[in-house]
């Protein structure tokens, strides 16, 4: 029982944080509107709960078991394996899993169009977060730390799937244009 509680807690928190990332994306995308798609948030949470949280929980333990410790060499091995095996798998499952739950005819369409850009973008974010995870966080909290890191990543993934192309540039342009539209609508309301 003692081993089940950390697993359930880690996986549940991970799923909730991932779903929260979708909710954040929708709140930013639909500022001032009540057009939030809670079914989409549920779908993102289901993929994160059923796959991402479980996979990361056991993956991080397997890495630590095979490459124990916090030496530079051990952390480097964990990072290389994480980014070359786990990251592509997790990104692929997100795009295809959410597409399947949304009932899309071609569940691989988003994956084909956005995977490579998303993977390259992830290489700017995840190695740093995982470095901190492997260096500073005790094993029993690593999935939780990844979930917290995944909150922002999930918002980016949800944006990319809905209206982006998997690149940071498109996300930054979208945020900038959203802020400009918000400012101009505020100026028009003042008149």
Image (cartoon, rainbow, N blue to C red):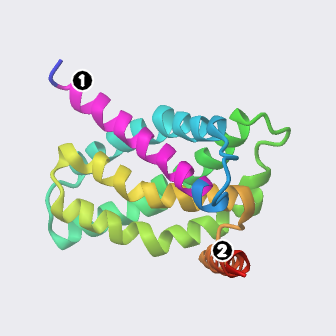
**Residue 135 image point, x, y percent:** 19, 65
Q: Could you classify mark 2 by the number of other residues whose Cα lies within 10 Å: few (under 14), some (14-19), or many (20 or more)? A: some
Q: Looking at the image, which residue sits at the far right?
A: 105
**Quadrant in the picture for the C terminus:** bottom right
Q: Distance between the residues labelled 1 and 2?
A: 47 Å
Please provide percent x and percent y for residue 78. Answer: 31, 60
Residue 14 highlighted magenta (yes or no)? yes
Main structural element of the magenta stretch: helix, strand or loop?
helix
Label of residue 182 in the image: 2
- Please provide the residue range marked out in magenta: 3-26
In the picture of the structure, the residue carrying the numbered disc 1 is 4
Q: For residue 111: magenta?
A: no
Which residue sits furthest top?
1
Q: Which of 141 and 152 is in front in this view?
A: 152
For the residues carrying marks 1 and 2, which lies nearer the camera in this image? 2
Specify whether residue 89 is in view: no
Based on the displayed image, in which of its 4 quarters is residue 6 positioned?
top left
Q: Is mark 1 on a helix, strand or loop?
A: helix
- Image quarter in which the N terminus is found: top left
């Amino acid at each position: 029982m003692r081993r089940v509680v950390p697993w359930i807690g880690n996986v549940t928190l991970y799923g909730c944080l991932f779903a929260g990332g979708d909710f954040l994306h929708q709140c930013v995308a639909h500022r001032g509107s009540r057009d939030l798609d809670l079914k989409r948030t549920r779908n993102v949470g289901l993929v994160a709960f059923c796959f991402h949280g479980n996979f990361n929980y056991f993956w991080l333990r397997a890495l630590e078991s095979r490459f124990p410790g916090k030496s530079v060499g051990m952390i480097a091995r964990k990072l290389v394996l994480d980014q070359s095996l786990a990251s592509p798998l997790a990104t692929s499952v997100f795009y295809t899993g959410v597409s399947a739950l949304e009932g899309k005819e071609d569940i691989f369409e988003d994956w084909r169009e956005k995977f490579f850009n998303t993977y390259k973008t992830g290489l700017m974010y995840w190695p740093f977060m995982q470095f901190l995870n492997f260096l500073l966080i005790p094993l029993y909290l690593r999935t939780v730390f990844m979930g917290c890191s995944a909150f922002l990543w999930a918002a980016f993934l949800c944006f990319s799937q809905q209206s982006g192309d998997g690149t940071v540039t498109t996300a930054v342009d979208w945020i900038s244009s959203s802020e400009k539209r918000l400012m101009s609508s505020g100026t028009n309301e003042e008149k």
